Amino acid sequence: MDNLDLQAFRDSLAEPQPPVDLSPALEALWWDGKGDWNKAHERAQEHENRAGMHVHAYLHRKEGDQSNAEYWYRRCDIVPSTLTVDEEWEELARALLKQG
């Protein structure tokens, strides 16, 4: 995943599989970007670290399950997003890509 930026991450959505060495949280966002919410959800819940829980919250928000989303936002100590889901996806991707 050497120096993958947001544009390269977006471009990779045209591929059948995610780039190698993505964190589970980034891989979850990648699958969500491909339109596979279920696979994204599976990846997000594989690790209960802050990044995974934040993506998990985002996914439930996107799904329309606000109470479940709020539960996961609380678990990772993050204020629920007021951005559009597309904007939140981008914000999450940028932050996670910076973390490496």
Image: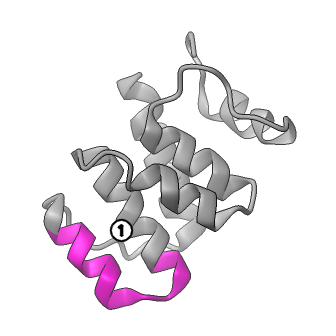
Residue, x 18% and y 58% (percent of image)?
A: 76
On the image, the x and y values in percent for residue 41 come to 50, 62
Foreground residue, 73 or 38?
A: 38
Q: Is residue 36 left or right of residue 60?
A: right
Assign the magenta stretch its main secondary structure.
helix
On the image, the x and y values in percent for residue 7 come to 70, 33
The region drawn magenta spans 61-74
Magenta residue check for 66: yes
Circle 1: residue type: Ala
Residue underneath mark 1:
57
The C terminus appears in which quarter of the rendering? top left
Foreground residue, 96 or 72?
A: 72
Residue, x 67% and y 33% (percent of image)?
A: 9
Q: Residues within 10 Å of mark 1 (few under 14, many from 20)?
A: many
Judged from this view, the residue extending furthest toward the top is 2
Residue, x 53% and y 28% (percent of image)?
A: 22
